[in-house]
Every structure is written in C-alpha cells, then in structure tokens.
Image: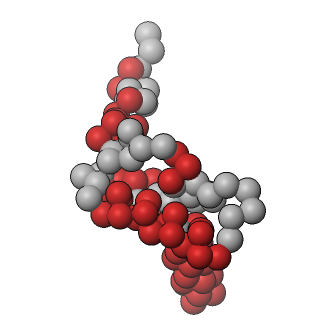
Amino acid sequence: MTEVSRLPGPVMDLWEWQYKGSCRDVDDTVFFHPEGERGAARRRRAEAAKAICAECPVLQQCREHALHVREPYGVWGGMSEDERAEILAEQDRKGRRSVRAV
C-alpha cells in the first residue's frame, strides 16, 4: 500500500496566495515591460506597479516567491528585476564566502 504521508500536499496550497494579490485584476503590462522600453518610461511603469504592490496583502509571499524561483522579469513583491538581481547577487556572494570559510 502507498504511504500517503510522504506524498506532497495539494499544489493549490502553494499558489493560493496569488488569488489575494492586488495585481490580480490589473493589466499585466503594468508589471512587465514591453520590448525595448527604457529610461523614464520604464521607471514610471515600474513605480506604478510598485504602488499597487505597496497596498497588497500578499506582498511578502510574492517577494519570497520571486526571489526563490529567481523570477527574471517584471515587478514582483514590489521589487523590479534589477532590485531582485542585486539581492540575489548579494546572497550568492555571501554563500560563496561561507563555503570558502569551511
């Protein structure tokens, strides 16, 4: 007989937080830049997305998800692609330092 206690839980439990996101009914073009968007236009779009994130009840779950899966595009959890890349690079540097210390 299969040992069901070792099976993963319902997948819905992992993603249910997304149903509570403030972004759920917002056009995704607010969060993801179009091809070739640069400079002030890109900054304005990202700031508009971050304003929506700032009021979001699941901001922390969204941010953790984006960092965990290394989400490469868009504004997630109130953070731009560049902001996430900076945090991840710092985590990688700390990880390499701790491995060398061992």
Which residue ends up furthest to the right in the rendered image?
A: 36
Residue 1 vertical placement versus 27 (above, below): above
Is 5 situated left or right of 99 in this image?
left
Q: Name the residue: 33% across, 45% down.
A: 21
Is 19 situated left or right of 95 in this image?
left
Which residue ends up furthest to the top in the rendered image?
A: 1
Q: Position of residue 53 (x, y in %)?
A: 35, 59
Q: Name the residue: 43% across, 63% down.
A: 48
Whether residue 45 can be seen here? yes
Q: Name the residue: 24% across, 52% down.
A: 57
Q: Tally the numbered discs.
A: 0
Q: Nearer the viewer, residue 34 or 101?
A: 34
Q: Position of residue 27 (x, y in %)?
A: 48, 43
- Name the image quarter holding the N terminus: top left
Q: Quarter of the image holding residue 36?
A: bottom right
Q: Position of residue 44 (x, y in %)?
A: 51, 69
Q: Nearer the viewer, residue 95 or 23?
A: 23
Q: Nearer the viewer, residue 15 or 54?
A: 54
Q: Nearer the viewer, residue 43 or 24?
A: 43
Residue 88 vertical placement versus 99 (above, below): above
Q: Name the residue: 32% across, 47% down.
A: 22
Q: Quarter of the image holding residue 90?
A: bottom right
Residue 15 vertical placement versus 89 (above, below): above
Is 26 situated left or right of 29 in this image?
left
- Name the image quarter holding the C terminus: bottom right
Whether residue 63 can be seen here? no
Q: How is the image coloured?
A: secondary structure
